[in-house]
Image: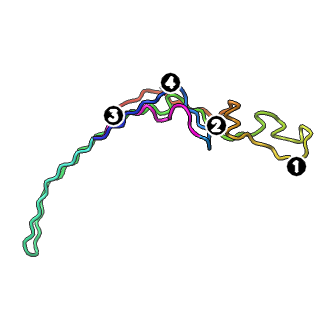
Amino acid sequence: MYKFNVNTNDPGGPGLDVQGFGFFGRNIFLPSYNMIRRYEFADNFTLTRGRHTPQMGFDELLRGDNSASATFFGGRFEFLQLPGGLVSPCLQVPAACGLSASTASAPISTLQSWSLGLPSFYEQGFGEQTIS
């Protein structure tokens, strides 16, 4: 028998994923309620007489699985590298701001997008968790 009952410390809050730096807040797979049962019965008999080996036996394997997962129920904000033009057109097209043409367009790093509050996307799970 195997049980994996997990609850999050923040059941209502979202998760924050800053690529390359870490996951903060709620984990996407929590809470998770699992139970697995696996039973195996065997009764085997082998008899060797000369060049003959008769065998007989009984095998039975019973399995069970109960699972409930609230994946993305609390939501998740994903912070990734973004184009610099989201903050300023000078970061997208430097020549438009009178900067030299050799200045390359600058992206916003994942840490900068997190500090500016600019997530790349948001995921939200809906429905009702069921146990089968």
Q: Image quarter for residue 68?
A: top left
Q: Image quarter for residue 89?
A: top right
Residue 102's disc is 1
Image depth: mark 2 or mark 3 in front: 2
Q: Which residues are magenta?
A: 22-36
Q: Earlier in the sequence, mark 1 or mark 2?
A: 2
* Residue 66 among magenta residues: no
Image depth: mark 1 or mark 3 in front: 1
Q: Earlier in the sequence, mark 1 or mark 3?
A: 1
The x and y percentages for residue 64 are: 28, 40
The kind of secondary structure element at disc 1 is: loop
The x and y percentages for residue 38 are: 26, 44
Give the spatial CA distance, label 3 vs label 4.
Answer: 24 Å
Give the spatial CA distance, label 4 vs label 1.
Answer: 48 Å
State the scheme by which the image is colored: rainbow
Q: Hey, what amino acid is under mark 4?
A: Gly
Give the spatial CA distance, label 1 vs label 3.
Answer: 61 Å
The kind of secondary structure element at disc 3 is: loop
